[in-house]
Amino acid sequence: MSASSAARMGSIDALRGLTVAAMLLVNNPGDWGHVYAPLLHAEWHGFTPTDLIFPLFLFIAGVSMAFSLEPRAIDVSARPLLGRTLLKRALRILLAGALLHVLAWWLFELPAYRLWGVLQRIAVCVAVVGLLAIHTRARTQWAVLGGLLLGYAALLLGADTLAPWLNPVSRVDTALFAPFLYKYDAVTRLGHDPEGLLSTAGALSTTLLGLIAGRWLRAGRLGALGGVALMLLGAGLLLAPLLPLNKNLWTPSYVLLTGGLSIAALLLGHQLVDRWHWPALGRRFGVNAIAAYLGSSVMALVLIASGAWAACYTMLANAVPGQPALASLLCAVGFVAFWWIIAWALDRRRIYLKI
């Protein structure tokens, strides 16, 4: 498969878009006290369907770089410009995440500003893995992936506990960044951030897996990819009793399991969309992914702070009495539908908002 034909594969945009839509669905229930269990993250150790969404997004980011960066990086003279463009985009995503947290801090009068977040993690992963895609060969990328997983596993396995607040990941983040974390207790001086510094090692591994899988997809190595998916799934499950599946810590077992599932999703999307020519559902979200996520996040914050979100949930709860979880889900589905209309309108006018 040539780079030019691979670049036209609609499955990647479709899968990215479906992932963004899933993000909006699980991040915006009508009422957090009434949510169906599969639409919630595991409280600590464990795994739910919702725990696949963020790693799948980062995995697809890596896949995309295998198509957008690696073919152009073959020309050594093009690499400096590619690197600068990549880092500028990563910086814009980072600043967008920082400003989003400024808005949340101001609207809700939070006790402290939060430094880390979803967009910040995306920016770091895009920058680091993008530079690897531009400047390194496959052998080096495999070595970095192995080093990240083995080093992070050694750190976690050597810890006295992986309990909330007391694990080494939370302690390092607290020592470096308190009180500017997702959660911080000023009395105990314990804190935690699910998108903090150390757990980024796991997120980088997920993105790097996407880069490698994307290269194999470009080369048409579909059977090998299927075998790798099965191996990763098996390895993640075998490692889980020793090193639990945990999204908050982004543990190596979690990387392996979600990596296997992500490759399976990539292969399924490729088969359905690129080879059987099924409709590329989600593509409209996919071509404006970061803009849709950022715009919807700003809208959600404003609606919640103004009380409009609670009013919407109350109205739906009255419409389906005795089913608060259904009302909460309908609120989230309506929010996704609203943003799908925006994405549809932008795509129809060929407007693609790149951050």
Image (cartoon, rainbow, N blue to C red):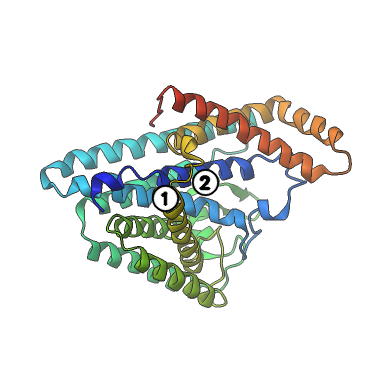
Tell me the quarter of the picture where residue 301 sits: top right
Residue 197, can we see it?
A: no
> Looking at the image, which residue is at 38% across and 31% down?
354
Horizontal side, residue 230 vs residue 298: left or right:
left
Q: Position of residue 86 (x, y in %)?
A: 28, 40
Please name the residue that numbered disc 2 is placed on. 19
Residue 137, can we see it?
A: yes
Horizontal side, residue 179 vs residue 43: left or right:
left
> Looking at the image, which residue is at 72% across and 42% down?
329
Residues at marks 1 and 2 touching, judged by CB atoms closer than 8 Å: yes
Q: Position of residue 147 (x, y in %)?
A: 33, 68
Quarter the C terminus occupies = top left
Work out how far the residue at label 1 is from the one at label 2, CA to CA, in angstroms: 9 Å
Q: Position of residue 219 (x, y in %)?
A: 27, 58
Please name the residue that numbered disc 1 is placed on. 60
Residue 343 vs residue 40, the one in the foreground: 343
Amino acid type at mark 1: Ile
